[in-house]
C-alpha cells in the first residue's frame, strides 16, 4: 500500500515539474513572466535579509567596530592610544558612545544591505551578514 502512495506522490511531483518547465524556457519577449515567477522568492529573500542583517548582524558588527574606534579616538585625545590608563578612561566616554551610534547606524545600513543583496541573491549568506562578497 505504501508503494502505491509513494508512486502517486512521485508522479504528481513529476507532473508539477513538467508544468513549470515551459514557463522557465520562455523566449525574450516573455521575460516579464519570468520576473513574475521570481518576484515572490526575491521579495521573501530581501525581507528576511533585511530583518536578519538589519536587526541582528549589522548592529552587532557596527556597534563593536565603532566601540573600538571611539575608544581609540578618545584615548588618543588623552595622550596615548595604546596606554592602559587612557584606554580605561576612554571606554565609558568614547566606547559607549561608539557602541550606541554604531548600533543605530548598523540598523540602517544592515537593513538596506539585506534588502539589496537579498533581492539580487535571495537567501544567500551574503544577504544575512554585512561583509562584502569576495
Image: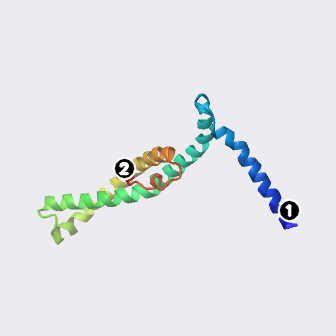
In the rendered view, would you say 18 is above or below 87?
A: above
Quarter of the image containing the C terminus?
bottom left
Residue placed most toward the observer, 111 or 40: 40
Residue density around tag 2, few if under 14, some if 14–19, many if 20 or more, within 10 Å: some
Residue placed most toward the observer, 66 or 120: 120
For residue 8, side relative to residue 37 (left or right): right
Residue density around tag 1, few if under 14, some if 14–19, many if 20 or more, within 10 Å: few
Q: What is the x, y in percent for residue 97?
A: 29, 56
Q: Nearer the viewer, mark 1 or mark 2?
A: 1
Residue placed most toward the observer, 108 or 121: 121
Q: Quadrant of residue 8?
A: bottom right
Looking at the image, the residue that sits furthest to the left is 79
Q: Residue at x 84, y 67 (%)?
A: 2
- Mark closer to the chain start, 1 or 2: 1
Residue bearing mark 1: 4
Q: Residue at x 41, y 47 (%)?
A: 108
Q: What is the x, y in percent for residue 3?
A: 83, 65
Q: Quadrant of residue 82?
A: bottom left
For residue 16, side relative to residue 4 (left or right): left
For residue 79, side relative to residue 70 (left or right): left
Q: Residue 105 has which mark?
A: 2
Q: CA distance from mark 1 to mark 2?
A: 57 Å
Q: Residue at x 49, y 49 (%)?
A: 50
Looking at the image, the residue that sits furthest to the right is 1
Query: For numbered disc 1, what is the local secondary structure?
Result: helix
For residue 18, side relative to residue 66 (left or right): right
Residue placed most toward the observer, 117 or 47: 117
Amino acid at each position: 500500500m505504501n508503494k502505491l502512495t509513494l508512486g502517486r506522490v512521485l508522479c504528481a511531483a513529476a507532473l508539477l515539474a513538467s508544468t513549470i518547465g515551459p514557463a522557465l524556457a520562455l523566449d525574450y519577449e516573455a521575460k516579464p513572466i519570468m520576473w513574475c515567477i521570481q518576484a515572490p522568492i526575491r521579495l521573501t529573500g530581501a525581507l528576511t535579509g533585511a530583518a536578519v542583517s538589519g536587526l541582528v548582524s549589522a548592529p552587532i558588527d557596527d556597534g563593536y567596530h565603532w566601540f573600538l574606534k571611539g575608544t581609540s579616538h578618545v584615548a588618543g585625545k588623552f595622550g596615548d592610544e595604546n596606554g592602559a590608563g587612557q584606554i580605561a578612561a576612554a571606554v565609558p566616554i568614547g566606547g559607549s558612545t561608539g557602541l550606541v551610534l554604531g548600533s543605530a547606524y548598523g540598523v540602517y545600513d544592515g537593513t538596506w544591505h539585506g534588502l539589496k543583496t537579498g533581492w539580487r541573491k535571495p537567501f544567500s549568506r551574503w544577504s544575512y551578514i554585512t561583509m562584502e562578497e569576495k
